[in-house]
Image (spheres, rainbow, N blue to C red):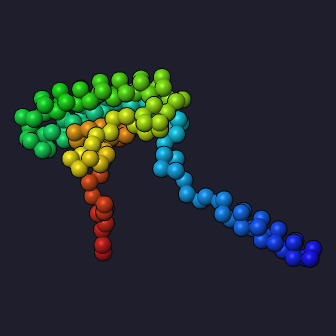
Amino acid sequence: MKKLALAFTLFAVALTGTASADIQAPPGADYTSNRKLGRALSNILYGFMEIPEQLVRRSRANGRKAATYGLVDGTSRTFRRLGYGFYELVTFHCPTYRGTFKPPYERCGQDGRIQMDPTNGLSEFPPQLGFEGEFSHVRTQTW
């Protein structure tokens, strides 16, 4: 009888141990207060990169005459990034956007889903510094 009770107890412990394990992370696990602080500092320090980025994007899309629109749009986006940066710097320790640490400047598409649109809306981080390569290959010399 003792062996049966011991076996039943071990089976119950093993069953509850495996049943209570959860290996999936919640959807907001990637967004933490540290990421929010990093996003705030990058928006403050590198938000000005929106000006040359928008100059290039608008010029490519609409020709040289759109450079003034790119300058105005880039300046507007720079000030928005600065505002969000200071807001997130002050509130980095508490989840402010829908109870999470996600960026508050997401834009809903026509289908209602949330999307990051770097052309019309802001992406999570500012554009990167320097030149961006457009080709995934390099030139090599063959003999």
* Residue 79: image location, x then y, percent: 29, 24
* Residue 40: image location, x then y, percent: 44, 30
* Residue 99: image location, x then y, percent: 47, 36
* Residue 49: image location, x then y, percent: 31, 33
**Horizontally, is 17 left or right of 35 in the view?**
right
- Who's the residue at 71% across and 67% down the image? 15
Front residue of this view, candidates 43 and 56: 43
- Who's the residue at 52% across and 30% down the image? 94
Front residue of this view, candidates 94 and 124: 94
Q: How many marks?
A: 0
Which quadrant does the N terminus fall into?
A: bottom right
Q: Would you say residue 131 is visible in this rendering?
A: no
Q: Residue furthest front?
A: 1
Residue 26, relative to residue 33: is it above or below? Answer: below
- Who's the residue at 93% across and 74% down the image? 2
Front residue of this view, candidates 109 and 3: 3
- Residue 24, quarter of picture: bottom right
Residue 107, relative to residue 135: is it above or below? Answer: above
Residue 88, relative to residue 24: is it above or below? Answer: above
- Who's the residue at 17% across and 27% down the image? 72
Q: Would you say residue 9 is visible in this rendering?
A: yes
Front residue of this view, candidates 128 and 111: 111
Which quadrant does the C terminus fall into?
A: bottom left
